Amino acid sequence: MTSLNRLARHVQLRTIWLLLFLLAACLSSTSAHSTSRIAHFLPDIALNEIFPTATHTSEPAGSLPVAKVFKDQEQLGYVYVTTDIVNTRGYSSFPIDTLVAMSMDGSIVAAKLLEHHEPIVLIGIPESRVEAFIQGYIGQNYIKNRPKPGAPPPVDIISGATVTLMVVGDSIMRSSQLVARQEGIGQPAAPATAPVAVKRSIDTSNHTISSWDELLQSGAIQRLHVSVADINQAFIDNGRTEAAAHPQEGDPQDTFIDLYAALVSVPSIGQSLLGEADYNYLQQELKPGQQAMLVVGNGLYSFKGSGYVRGGIFDRIEIIQDLDSFHFTDLDHQRLPGVKAAG
């Protein structure tokens, strides 16, 4: 793993970016039909190497295409391909197909890279090391033992393939939880009367112009401030022994990162931060269902990330909605010279 000391040698940044993302398309489920990836790969999967007593599988079914594995009439587990379940794209922007097999209780019993178009081999990393990373997920059960936010993967990330392995590992974890939800693994019986969900919507008629401080206080702008002391303590608290042995240098009170984010497609927020002219231009650019997010950073640590430098991927920014997640690329952003809010 690259030490944060080396990362912090980048010049201090005062950069503002506008990131566009499509919620509707990214969060839509894949239909289970003959064009699913599991249907494509299933005939070539050596099922007996995963479930030694298996006799057959069902046809892929469900809004998330999953094939059930059987020994005669007894179900042994499930097999699926991550790209049918979650958005799995790395440097190349092409899907990274990973086979996952789960037991009836949600334990991962097999994981294998099936197909990818990543440049990891071109930079001298053998695929055997990538396979070893993926196989480190075998035995994990993310239904019984849900990971804490920010928890490290069960296997160390390989330097030089950080983005690819981060995406693959995240897809294995999230897809197993989504499949478990669809198949009812580890879930209590539904109550006789389900609570009525409260529906909320954005008030697009509100065009109140607010200052920077007012937006912060209301929560329209979210802030994360981490000092050098904070990050070094976080290494210790999270058991990152290698990082803790190489602490970030500098005054403990120095700013490691001062990060802000706001949803500027919301009229009152966007008009306050972008000004009327830029907000109107943004609205013309956004397609139905798209939202825009402003990210502002300062300090020793760049939110752009090493993946952005090498492959145009913001590997340190991830949008998570329940069990759906995705990253931005350089095609999704626009650099801004500043913000217009007072203060």
Image (cartoon, helix red, strand yellow):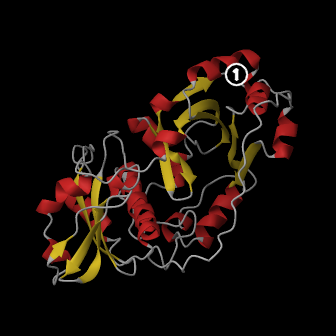
Q: Is residue 42 visible?
A: yes
- Determine the residue positioned at 59% across, 36% down: 11
Residue 29: x, y in percent?
42, 50
Badge 1 density bin: few <14, some 14–19, many ≥20, Cα 10 Å: many
Q: In the shown orientation, is residue 257 left or right of residue 180?
A: right
Picture quarter with the N terminus: bottom left
Residue 285 vertical position relative to residue 305 in the rendered view, above or below: above
- Determine the residue positioned at 36% across, 45% down: 90
Q: In the shown orientation, is residue 171 left or right of residue 96?
A: right
Residue 310: x, y in percent?
39, 37
Residue 224 vertical position relative to residue 286 in the rendered view, above or below: below
Q: Is residue 314 visible?
A: no
What amino acid is found at the position of numbered circle 1 in the picture?
A: Tyr
Q: Quadrant of residue 312?
A: top left
Q: Nearer the viewer, residue 65 or 239?
A: 65
Q: Quadrant of residue 123?
A: top left
Residue 196: x, y in percent?
70, 63
- Label 1 belongs to which residue? 279
Q: In the shown orientation, is residue 212 left or right of residue 3?
A: right
Picture quarter with the C terminus: top right
Residue 168: x, y in percent?
36, 56
- Determine the residue positioned at 63% across, 65% down: 234
The local secondary structure at tag 1 comes to helix
Q: Nearer the viewer, residue 88 or 51?
A: 51
